Image (cartoon, rainbow, N blue to C red):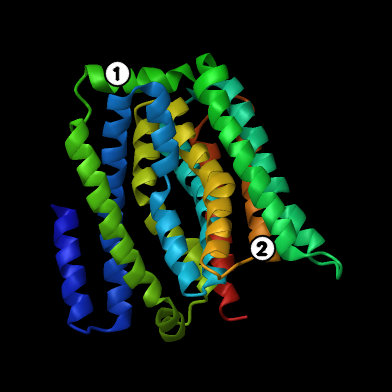
């Protein structure tokens, strides 16, 4: 119901020729319930499809909103916005979402535990997908002989292959290590937590995807006017505003799972979403930019690189003991707020 209301309001504001600032924020708010609908539909389809195919579907559609917004941004030539939204999704999921999950869950449960083997596997993937894949092209591109597009192509291809291998690892060859995901799907089906039947879920997912595409087009179309009107840089809009919009539904899910003391699932939502963005969404956006004739380089600015590396290192340190508490969550959220303020100040530099 909320999604339908926001779609109507967004259309009225758009075709009523309201201010571009109002159009931007109404479109942004409208995307949030639509993203939640896509998540619910995907979860329902995944529950009906079984743990293996369901896990693959969840991995594929988990960050569909970021992908859609990214594609429309590429069409507009907003390369800095695309890279900033990738940065924002990574630091937002790792520091804000996971930190808030640790904090909220820690208030109710003094010490919470999660699968240490899975945490170590995720930590290794984070170091590769962010720590190496994003840093190496940026450093090598500083030399006069380096071809940034060749570097970007190589990194995108390798990241995508490793991500697919990671899915094969978790869904097939080492399925028992990730057994808690399967248990979650089975429990949801047994207790009637599946929100939609299969056919309605598929229809809902298609409709929500189309509506998100429309709202994303309207949102991206007003970015430049917002940047000029409010004095915000495209980097700040991408890192904070667009990233929060695209991940709002997942944010709520991860925190709710932590409150219920299901830290394995909470960790999977936050860290898994980060890996999707770094090793799937970013390469797909790069190859999409080549296909539409607006290629961009996977070369990030130093503030973006330092922020992503700092987020990865802090989260890896917090995960490696297999337990969490509210103070660790407060530290992660505090780190995110510091980075957000830093990106805000860039617009006045």
Q: Residue 182, how many percent across, how many down?
A: 40, 19
Q: Give the alpha-carbon distance from disc 1 to disc 2, as whole Å.
A: 42 Å
Determine if residue 313 is in view.
no
Where is mark 2, residue-wise? Answer: 300
Picture quadrant of residue 94: top right
Q: Nearer the viewer, residue 328 or 273?
A: 273
* First in residue order: circle 1 vs circle 2: 1
Determine crowd level at label 1: few under 14, some 14-19, many 20+ residues with C-alpha closer than 10 A: some
Q: Give coordinates of residue 183: x percent, y percent.
A: 38, 17
- Residue 327 horizontal/vertical position (percent): 53, 38
**Residue at 47% of width from left, 61% of height from top?**
70
Between 307 and 170, the residue placed more toward the observer is 170
Q: Residue at x 86, y 70 (%)?
A: 144
Secondary structure beneath label 2: loop
Please give the residue where the numbered disc 1 appears in the rendered image: 187
Give the image quarter of residue 312: top right
Toward the viewer: 37 or 213?
Answer: 213
- Residue 279 at x, y = what percent? 58, 45
């Amino acid at each position: 119901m909320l999604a339908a209301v926001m779609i109507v309001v967004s259309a009225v504001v758009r075709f009523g020729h309201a201010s571009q600032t109002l159009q931007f924020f109404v479109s942004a708010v409208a995307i949030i319930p639509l993203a939640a609908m896509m998540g619910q539909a995907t979860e329902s389809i995944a529950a009906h499809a079984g743990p293996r195919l369901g896990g693959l579907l969840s991995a594929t559609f988990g960050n569909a909103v970021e992908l859609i917004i990214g594609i429309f941004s590429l069409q507009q030539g907003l390369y800095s916005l695309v890279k900033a939204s990738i940065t924002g999704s990574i630091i937002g999921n790792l520091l804000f979402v996971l930190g808030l999950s640790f904090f909220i869950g820690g208030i109710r449960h003094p010490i919470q535990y999660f699968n240490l083997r899975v945490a170590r596997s995720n930590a290794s993937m984070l170091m590769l997908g962010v720590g190496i894949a994003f840093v190496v092209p940026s450093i090598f591109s500083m030399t006069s002989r380096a071809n940034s597009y060749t570097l970007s192509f190589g990194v995108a291809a390798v990241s995508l292959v490793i991500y697919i291998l990671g899915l094969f690892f978790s869904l097939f060859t080492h399925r028992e290590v990730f057994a808690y995901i399967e248990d979650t799907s089975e429990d949801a089906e047994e207790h009637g937590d599946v929100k939609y039947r299969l056919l309605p879920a598929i229809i809902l997912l298609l409709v929500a995807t189309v509506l998100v595409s429309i709202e994303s087009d309207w949102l991206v179309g007003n970015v430049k006017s917002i940047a000029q009107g409010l004095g915000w840089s495209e980097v700040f809009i991408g890192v904070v505003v667009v990233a929060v919009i695209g991940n709002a539904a997942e944010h709520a899910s991860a925190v709710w799972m932590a409150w219920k003391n299901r830290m394995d699932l909470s960790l999977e939502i936050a860290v898994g979403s980060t890996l999707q963005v770094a090793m799937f969404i970013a390469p797909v956006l790069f190859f999409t930019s080549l296909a539409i004739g607006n290629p961009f380089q996977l070369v990030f600015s130093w503030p973006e690189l330092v922020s992503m590396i700092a987020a990865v290192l802090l989260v890896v340190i917090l995960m490696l003991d297999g337990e969490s508490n509210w103070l660790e969550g407060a530290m992660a959220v505090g780190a995110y707020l510091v980075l957000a303020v830093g990106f805000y100040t860039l617009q006045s530099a």
